[in-house]
Amino acid sequence: MSAMSVFRSFLFAPGNHPRRVEKALSLDADAVILDLEDACPIAEKVATREVVVAACQKPRSGLAYIRVNAATTEWGFSDIVAVVRKGVDGIILPKADTVDEVRAAEWAITNLERERGLAAGAIDLIPIIETAKGLANLRAIAAAGTRIRRIAFGAGDFTLDLAMTWSRSEAELLPFRSECVLASRAGGLEAPLDTVWADLKDADGFRASAEHVKGLGFQGKMCIHPDQVAVTNEVFAPTAAEVAWSRKAVAAFAEAEKAGSASIQLDGNASSPSPSGSRRAVAEVGSPRTREGNAQMAGETAPSPHPTVKALQGVRVIDVSSFLAGPYCTTQLAEFGAEVIKLELPKVGDALRKFGTMTPSGDSLPWLQETRNKKCVTLDLRKPEGAELLKRFIRHADVLVENFQPGTLEKWGLGWETLKEENHKLIMVRISGFGQTGPYSPRPGFGRIGNAFGGLSYLAGFPDRPPTTPGSATIPDYLSGLYGALGVMYALRARDMTGRGQYIDIALYEPIFRILDELAAAYDYKGYVRERMGPGTVNVCPHSHYPTKDGKWVAIACTSDKIFARLAEAMGKPEFAGDGKWGKILDRDRDRKEIDAWVANWTEQFTLTECIAECDKFEVPCGPVYSIADIFNDPHYAARENILRMADPRVGEIAMPNVVPRLSDTPGKVEWLGPTLGEHNDEVFKGLLGLSDAEIGRLKDKGVV
């Protein structure tokens, strides 16, 4: 698959006619579609697969696509399995009605590429929108996968689906084609393709149709006769005037950028938008794409292999959680492209807004950080009209996240059994202190309780002192949020296969209990109860924090006999390792106090920097024990951009942890900080639920929103 390919003409050829296939591949269409669907009789569908795959192995100048049968038919996925081979450039997926169908096709292609030794992303996927249902789901479909570079609009089948009369002027199709262009643009895709003009005798009508869709923003058209190819190539090739204007625009913006100007004048008109469209127009002019690649205009940079795609693009999340665990779950989803709509009590908002260090915005630093990339809407779920509005949200959602005490949503008529009736594909994350079941489930819970009940607090501190908070009382909240986001990923993947949603039940203490290494097994196996050990660690030694000459601390971790041997050599006592008195872990564990004192005496001879250098010389794992001030001054944090600085008109620039994890192809990103209360009410209530200004005003007066 060529990168960001520009196609004008796609020529259909019935896959069960070898002569027509051969002729189509020899013509000057930018791409040929070998058809396994409409043009192929049912009795010949299976046998035709081998014919089209064989045709794709032959030398040719243009690209070869295969139109498989619809994903909902008995042949759809077996077609994909049969034809994803070397030599095939892409798959055309007809009657793409739902995100799940498209994601399932993408998943199948991805796995087949890996199994068959093809480059990742080698096979393009073009969904055709041919029904009202497909159009309703178009924005989500356009964002459904990384291999979708463009969509196509099937005008003929679309008019049949709506029982419309397809007129020669095609005026009745204007809003639907416009939506295809807008959705493609919003999803970061290339301009869409238009499908066939069926009347082969009406050459003038075909040209008029091609010119019409080009004016709307389409980039090419599918053809069902060789005579249509030349017309399509001519209509969709940019004119000399268009190329000249685009070059002029790019040059003008470059000059303005160099001069620091915010706007330009072009042909007497002031302008300030991004020149990306002009740059792209210039880059796309020239020879059509071939298997050898497209000739780039002189001086232009080749486009990126993939359009800008977000990993969770097209996933909509409704966040009715509060404070930290649930909101952190949805923050991670939002950072990777999910649309997160956070619902808060009118006039009150989330408690996190007033928790921690306050800012001039009236909201706290934790709020600004943990509500980044979300849309904030006010809604009182306790009121019947509020509950009904949540149900309407659910019909448009993929995920709901909540962390009320168990039974609260059920009391409001919004429990799992009710909500799944509104949307059987819904995934619901439920985070609570003790989970949805068990004798303690009704109890409230916070992070401190999670640390204590989960077994971590008992281990924190020194053996002769009370248990302490292990670093932060919020660890269970953040870990539960992590497990919640991970559960969403699992459930989305399962939904791709089953078509059904499910709920995810997490108790705050459970992630804590899960990370306590062998604690449970050791107790059950030997009755061993681990006690507090200060900075030391069970099973290994030396493995602690040690003082340095400049009053700082260094962490040293000797997790094996080999590592201890390297430390002993660094300390000038190699005879202590190997067959020496401390060569085995059991020996070191027996003399733990003596060894820790010996290592501490050695580290105190050096500054922190010198001690780390000595350890590095002998490949002994070590690191500084950092305060937050040390972190801000460390070059490694800076090099990896772990600290993100965000400018916000309400508070100026503030720093916060950057997005984790790092994805090489579809990285996460922070686009804005926590919004003001109800900032997105109009956008969401009008745009998503279709409420009028009068309805919103009435609900506001009643305190529902």
Image: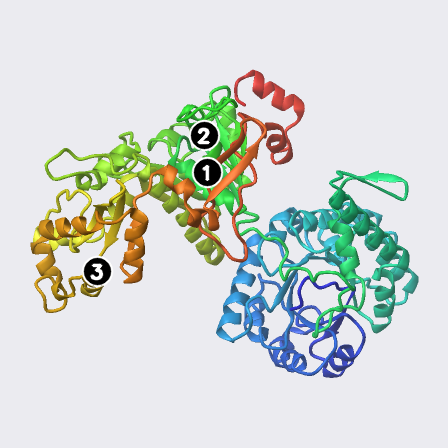
Residue type, numbered disc 3: Leu
Count of numbered tags: 3
Task: Check disc 1: other Cα within 10 Å, few if <14, some if 14-19, many if 20+.
Answer: some
- Residue under pointer 3: 567
- Res 292 quadrant in image: bottom right
Q: Residue drawn at (64%, 35%), measured in percent from left and top?
A: 687
Picture coordinates of residue 658, whole percent (x, y): 47, 44
Residue type, numbered disc 1: Met
Q: Is residue 488 visible?
A: no
Picture coordinates of residue 532, whole percent (x, y): 15, 42
In front: label 3 or label 1 = 3
For residue 365, the mark is: 2
Mark before the other along the chain sequence, 2 or 3 = 2
- Residue under pointer 1: 656
Q: CA distance from mark 2 to mark 1?
A: 9 Å
* Quadrant (top left/top right/bottom left/bottom right) for the N terminus: bottom right
Q: Is residue 188 left or right of residue 245?
A: left
* Quadrant (top left/top right/bottom left/bottom right) for the C terminus: top right
For residue 247, the mark is: none
Residue type, numbered disc 2: Leu
